Image (cartoon, rainbow, N blue to C red):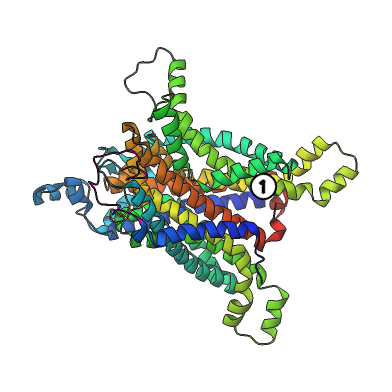
Amino acid sequence: MKDRMLTYFAKRIIQVPLIVFIVVTMGFIILKLAPGDPVAHFAGEGASPEYLEMIRRAYGLDKPILEQYMTYITGIFTGNWGYSPSFERPVLTVIMERLPLTLILSLAAFILALPLGVLLGMTAALKRGSLIDSFIRSFATFFNAIPAFIIGLLLLFTFSVNMRLLPIGGFQTIGVTYTSILDRVIDILQHIILPATSLMLIWMVDYTRVTRNRFIEALLSDYTRAAVSRGIKWRRILFKHVLRNSILPVVTLAGVQVGYMLGGVILTETVFSWPGIGMLIVQAVSYRDYPLLMGVLFISSLWVSITNIVIDIIYMILDPRVRLQ
Amino acid sequence: MRIRLNKRFIIQSAALAFLFFLGFFSSIICPRDPLKPGYSPGLTPPSPTFPMGTDQLGRDVFSWVLCGIRVAFYVGVTATLLCFAIALIVGAIAGFYGGIIDQILMRLTDLMMSIPRFVLIVVFAILFGSNINNLILIIGGLSWPRLARVIRGEVLSLKEREFVLSAKVIGCSDLDILFSEILPNTIPTILPLLSLQMAHSVIDEVGISFLGFGDPEVPSWGRLIALGRAAIFAGGWWVLIWPCIVCAIFLLLINLLADTLNDILNPRTQG
């Protein structure tokens, strides 16, 4: 059985470079087909033909298209992701600078959202039909409907502009010398609290809704009734039977959220000028910085594929039925 | 199949119909051209003349918000129909015929889902132009994979059911079985999802416009919200708050309606 699991994972892991390869190829084709000349856009209006020619040569755009493609593909797998004209630095360097900031923001939101959301869902399910239940349900419906960036804008207006309690954006205060590491942490925390809260609220209620529904199903199920009639302690039933049986959809949901994180944070990062991957995408698009754009597409699809594999592994650990198949 | 009309359903759809009415007649109702600047000096606070104030260029926020309803409905409905059409074709064919066709279509779906949708929408919007109809094609054309998977799953389970098998036995053609036996039975699952898809399409368009990649000829809430984000630092809260509130109400109504539809059509999953 262990062999079978290993072969399964080997297969899944081989799929990753394959998907990435197709994504990169499609991206390359789309960018080549797209109307408009990125070189002209980059050089600005009134640039001389000689200057355009020079840029083309500098970026290897004068070579035949197939050769450009081969160079790009080999570059992707050897860590040379090209050179970003708008940042005037290698694409990989720019992305690696921004990625940690997005990870800090979204993980902060995620780590709070998951347990709180599940807890709220459990509470609602156990008090089904009560005032608390309907309060939690309305809360969940509300934040499920409204996108994070609108919540973020309203938080920004209330707490930063109106009450002047928190900074209006960015990752840390510009031009400040910190006296200690603690100072810096507090500064970053003050900056992260609003964007993280807006993401957290949106993500949290997803778990609440799923957990509530599955928990109710599990509470009404035959195995719960059987466990009760066998005289097992209620607390043990809740955690050993009910929670365990309702956790799989939560894991699926977590996978979707983490996987699409890089797309999900674009608007929220823009609202709070949080200099992560999301803002980088917007910058790459506005400057028509194609090498950077390709790099961002690449890292997003890589992120989704890796998350999917991790979720598969967690699934196998949690659900013996999947292991046996 | 009879939809039993319950109170929630009536109230919510009436509210949505009212919004639709406002949007449909917005060009008659709204007092001023939403995109024409100079009705007042910049950032005039709300007053009887300008119920929601004016923006930095003296444009009437009330007219913009009102006409934004029409934009939201236009984008929401058309993008959702496009998304549904593609998802239906892909999902029904993959589920019904199975085998190699199913494999190919599902790998294609996986591939589409391996890039965050909003990233792709932004990239396409800037590459292929941000005319509102282009945006609709992009949003609808990139949103179908999830729905296609659901439809495929439904078709897959329905085609083994007895009433489908008996239709096959009495010699109905494939198309007949698909359209008169299988697809009608997917409606309870799909209808709430379509309603949600409409909300997602609107969020996508508002998001794109908020980033500044939207259609400049169209009074989208997103662009007004982006103006509002700048205006709040100059005291112009009304430019931000009003479009946010109306957009939130719109999205909330659609979501509530989706929940209600789900409760009515799929009573077993009701909480």
The residue carrying pointer 1 sits among few (fewer than 14), some (14 to 19) or many (20 or more) residues within 10 Å by Cα, namely some
Residue nearer the viewer, A210 or A36 = A210
Question: Residue at left 74%, top 50%?
Answer: A217
Q: Secondary structure at mark 1?
A: helix
Range of magenta residues? B30-53
Q: Is residue A111 above or below residue A55?
A: above
> Subunit of mark 1?
A
Q: Quadrant of the C terminus of chain A?
A: bottom right
Q: Measuring from the top left, give residue A21's x and y in whole percent.
A: 42, 54
Q: Residue furthest top?
A: A179
Question: Residue at left 46%, top 34%?
Answer: A155
Q: Is residue A325 above or below residue A157?
A: below
Q: Residue furthest front?
A: B48
Which residue is the site of mark 1?
A248
Q: Measuring from the top left, give residue B249's x and y in whole percent.
A: 49, 49
Q: Residue furthest right?
A: A230
Q: Is residue A228 left or right of residue B22?
A: right
Question: Residue at left 42%, top 52%?
Answer: B204
Which secondary structure is most common in the magenta stretch? loop
Give the quadrant of residue A132.
top right
Residue B206 lies in the magenta stretch: no
